[in-house]
Image (cartoon, rainbow, N blue to C red):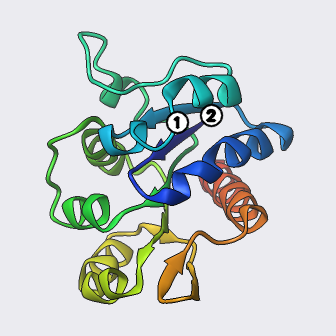
Amino acid sequence: MIILCVTGSIAATKCVQLARDLRRNGQEVKCFMSDAACKIITPTSMEFATTKPVVTELTGQIEHVKYSQEDLILVAPATANVISKFAYKISDNPINALLIAAYGHDTPILMVPSMHDSMYRAIGENIEKCKNDGVHFVDPKMAEGKAKFPDIENIVLESLRLINLNKADKE
């Protein structure tokens, strides 16, 4: 199963299609959404796309641990905030708690940065720190002064590639 973490970039509007395309490629998808993402699209939209309830807060079910050992943690879009907090293992929300638990289990993590280009440049060191920790990235499309969400097809292909690599490593 892919855990799709949707954060507060306007690119969150593309995540319904992303989740549907992942499912069309045979993947089960569960969604975590940040508070900021919920202001851009509704959890109901992602529940429709994934056919599963969306995690917006941690409960007694300890969702951040429960879903930390799935096939892939996909953070799309990945904001400067979530990338920078993860770089320093700060856990103050459900998505970062999930990321840290997944990292501790060596679960593959794929981030898809999407933000203004000045922010993208400013967090370059944090992105490199994450890469050095084994986190994978799909590079954004640089256009109009923004680090834009890449083509959904590229995200799906990289997700499937990482899942297959991880399964091969375990065999």
Disc 2 target residue:
1
Where 39 sits versus 121, above or below? above
The image shows residue 117 at horizontal and vertical percentages of 40, 86
Where 47 sits versus 91, above or below? above
The image shows residue 44 at horizontal and vertical percentages of 56, 22
| The disc label shown at residue 70, or none | 1
Q: Quadrant of residue 27?
A: top right
Where 104 sits versus 158, above or below? above
Q: Is residue 88 left or right of residue 30?
A: left
Hey, what amino acid is under mark 1? Glu
Quadrant in which the N terminus is drawn: top right
Where 132 sits versus 56, above or below? below
In terms of secondary structure, where does tag 1 sit? loop
Q: Is residue 76 left or right of residue 92?
A: right
Instruction: Report crowding for label 2: few under 14, some 14 to 19, many 20 or more residues within 10 A (C-alpha).
Output: some
Q: Residue at x 25, y 86 (%)?
A: 122
Q: Residue at x 72, y 69 (%)?
A: 151
Q: Are marks 1 and 2 in contact (CB under 8 Å)?
A: yes
Along the viewing direction, whichever of 115 and 92 lies nearer the viewer: 115
